[in-house]
Image: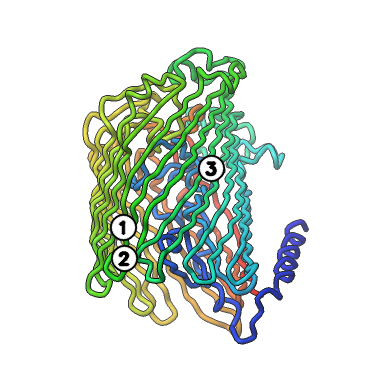
Amino acid sequence: MKKILFLLLITSISGIYAQILKDTTLPYGVFSTKYYYESDDKYFNNKRREIDTTFMKYQNYEGVLTSRNFYQNLGVSGSTSKAVFYEVNREIGLSSGYDAFSQYYHPSEKLVYYDTRSPFSQLNYVQGTTGESSLKVNLAAPISKKLGLGIDIGRFTSRKIAGRTGDKSADRLSSSYYLALYLNYKSANGRYQIFGNSTLDWNTQNENGGFNLSQFREKENLFDSLDFANINLFNASSFTNYYRNEVKIYQNYRISQDSLLGFFHEFGFQRCTTNIFIRPGVDSLGEKYFGTPSFYDSKNSSYSYRFDRLENKAGLTGKHQLIDYILFVKNRLIGSNLLATSKLVEDDTSYRTRVAENYIGADLRLKFLKEKLWLGLYAEQKILNSVSGCQDTTFKNSLKNDRVIDLYLGAPFIKIGYLYKETSPTVFQTNISHNNYRWTNVFPHGVQSSNLYLEFEKRVRKQYFAVNLYNTTLKHYIYFDSTKSVTQASDSINLLRASITTNFTLWKFHLDNQLEMAKTNNDTIFPVPSFVVLPKIYFGSKYKTLNFNIGIEALYVSGFYAYKYVPELNSFSTQRSYQTYGKPVVTPFVNGQIQNFSFWLKYSFVNQSIEKGYFTTPSYMGLPQTFSFGVNWLLYE
């Protein structure tokens, strides 16, 4: 009933704005509504994208299937996860270092802005019989021809697989909330524009520690006992709460209409807060992680960590038929606080650190043959660090002047390049786990990562083909070893990865495939599956106003020694005891669409009666057979 009332409220809001900017000479709906990202409007690109009305994508709502990378998780959507394949990005400098829920973040650069002449809203709802529930709402409305506002709201919940008591709240494993507000404004002459946003992500997880496999003679017997609440779990009472808030304001001004010279300024603030409670009896956090025994209490092993980052970035930018360029300087002010077992107070400076970072950088693109060929260069260098507060001398010795360079050659269907990055050798600086300044590891080398890549994609009418090749090298890589200790690899790690995506159509039959193949020279430190394959075949047709698809899709991940989960750190570490995956997941589905309303139904893991279950992470099994359905409704005024 609440969801119906909520839907009626959304419809009413759309109706309130229905009279804004009405123009009988323009077609409204999908024709007058476009969308874009930050990168499309920065630096005078002004790129707009068509609304995607394809209804074949909605049933793949799980992050495992919707991102470029593949993730291992705790068997439940919305739970702690880890990227399986390493991806080198352009980010350097200090970060929160916490990525347990990064798959579910909504960073500002991925926020969708809507450019619309009439109010627009979208509702997406998903419900699964195993307790998964998702609700997403997007609202966008033009206040004037130059100013637009929007709001995004989202919520996702999931239940434990085992150890259920029948109490709905007690059986909940994870829940997440998302809220984003944004605005965009452009002057009448088009020479000045500003847009801003505020995003909030809040993730909560009641960790059950996974299954104690020693109680089963054979691991497969576990899958026959999921309905019993008294299954022996490693941990039934740990709790993690993660809060992330970002605010960003970007503005630019161009001197002339040809955009050859312009100025820009970007302000950003990020706050990440982590609260973790671990049941008594697990390994002491103690000196191993925090450098002092005062951080551990046998009756209440808990801690809270907060990371703040204030960033100002400014420079020159221009766009011309021969060159696009950005020259910038950037300053970051960073602060961190650590609290544990209520023995510490936030204003105690002995547990607080402050860092200032300064950068210079450039983003250039030379264009040839009427923009059919381009040569690009992105380079950024940190030129100065200053540290004060907790263990400032030790930490300062760990900081280096980070740098990144990305050189590439591109054409409409192909891009080849080389990306190199070097960062300071601190666990705090890397994005492999959550961490804090109390880890006093001082490693002798900076972490170096490089990626030689080739990306090709081509669409010919209804046929689509894409190939991505990556050769990644990691030197002095930092990770958690099997003893949960922070370790720096002495040898280089090489990762080869090939990704092939095809979408073929023959009459009314569609065959979509995604194949990931990977190889590593060190599967102890960085294990990867030999291949991941996601085939899909379906029949699409139309009956009167109903478009529909009937098909079947599958997921198969070759068995590999996936990282194990460490509840007390809310992170992952290496292991060589159990192989995960190795079982196919087969899912039949039905999709339908009537005008702007889409729906889908699917039955996941229909072959489990034959194949039994599988593990996504050691001691954590994937979802059992589950029926789920969803709807997506686009509303135009």
Classed neighbour count for the residue bearing mark 1: other residues with Cα under 10 Å, few (<14), some (14–19), many (≥20): some
Q: Which circle's residue, 3 or 2, is located before the other in the chain?
A: 3
Distance of label 3 from label 2 (alpha carbons)? 30 Å
Q: Is residue 304 above or below residue 137?
A: above
In this view, the residue in front, 426 or 241, is 426
How far from the left and from the top, in percent, is residue 127? 63, 56
Identify the image quadrant of residue 630.
bottom right
Which amino acid, by three-letter code, is at mark 1? Ser
Distance of label 1 from label 3 (alpha carbons)? 26 Å
Q: Which circle's residue, 1 or 3, is located before the other in the chain?
A: 3
Residue where numbered disc 2 is placed: 466
Q: Viewed as shown, does residue 498 lie left or right of 125?
A: left
Residue where numbered disc 3 is placed: 79
Secondary element type, mark 2: strand
Q: Mark 1 and 2 residues: CB-CB less than 8 Å, in contact? A: yes
In this view, the residue in front, 492 or 283, is 492
Secondary element type, mark 3: loop
Which residue is rendered at x = 34% and y = 67% of the image?
502
